[in-house]
Amino acid sequence: MYDRILVPTDGSGPATAALEYGVRLAAILEATVHVLHVVEAPDEPENVLEDASGWARADGVSVIDDVRRGDPLEEIPAYAREEDIDAIVMGTHGRTGIGRFVLGSVTEHVVRTADVPVLVVRGDDDVRTQLPYETIVVPIDDSEHAELAIEVGIEAATKFDATLHVVSVIDVSPMGLEPQVDLRVDRLEDGAARIVDDAAQRATDRGVDDVVSTTVFGSIHRGITSYAADNDADLLIMGTHGRSGLDRYLLGSVTERVLRTAPAPVLTVQAPDTE
């Protein structure tokens, strides 16, 4: 699935949680972990990297470490491109907290701009970090980004022999109480059911043994996180837009909220820009 995993670290709690998770994942995949520390200030200590990479090596994983100077917003995606990284694992705070890797700064920027999947691990005690994966949840709609997410979900479910849940959340809150609402809801539900059923059939045809397809009602991000929590998800996989574009899964709306509140790590995958 992944041979080279990048884990940027600044020594913070969320970054350490991401490193621990990334090392465990790398051990299962027999992958190499690249530990990167980006130094911004001239007097910033560099022993952060020594501590992090030493701990990773002690776990028996192949480690490559590096120190870069500059802006982490630029250096992390650049390193991933230069070293042919397959995936990036990053930590983040949840609903509250301040730090360089808090959503809204480095992590969000990397999710937007990286050319590879970014696995976001929220550094809170209530996050489920089960490995190997047993239950994978993929929220989808009819966008190209969701198409990519289901492809990655099928690959992951096959690799880990996991149950794959394909879910579409139907948000009817903006509709009001017009007489035609029932008809519109029925059409939305039928359309969502077709999308998840088609994706589930594709997964079954590709060899995934245990596939669940469902639709739920509610606000999009709450529906996703509630479904993941209710079904003990070990991993969520979501498609995102990159630098531009508007869509239900645009960062700053649904994806960002899910990253802040998800009960398990979230793997974000980005379709190529079409603009």
Image: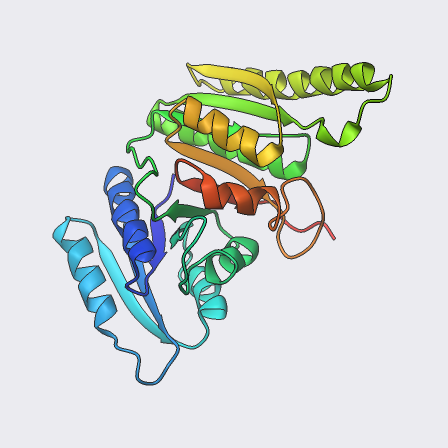
Q: State the quadrant of the N terminus.
A: top left
Q: Does residue 150 appear in this view? A: no
Q: Does residue 98 appear in this view? A: yes
Q: Which residue is at the front of the view, 19 or 150? A: 19
**Residue located 24% across and 67% down the image:** 49
**Residue located 48% across and 56% down the image:** 103
Side (left or right) of 214 relative to 57: right
Side (left or right) of 260 relative to 202: left
Measured as percent of width and height from the top left, residue 119 is found at: 42, 46
Measured as percent of width and height from the top left, residue 92 is found at: 40, 53
Above-or-below relation of 180 to 57:
above
**Residue located 24% across and 43% down the image:** 24
Above-or-below relation of 151 to 3:
above
**Residue located 49% across and 16% down the image:** 212
Measured as percent of width and height from the top left, residue 89 is found at: 38, 51
Side (left or right) of 14 relative to 223: left
- In the image as oriented, which residue stretches furthest toward the right? 179
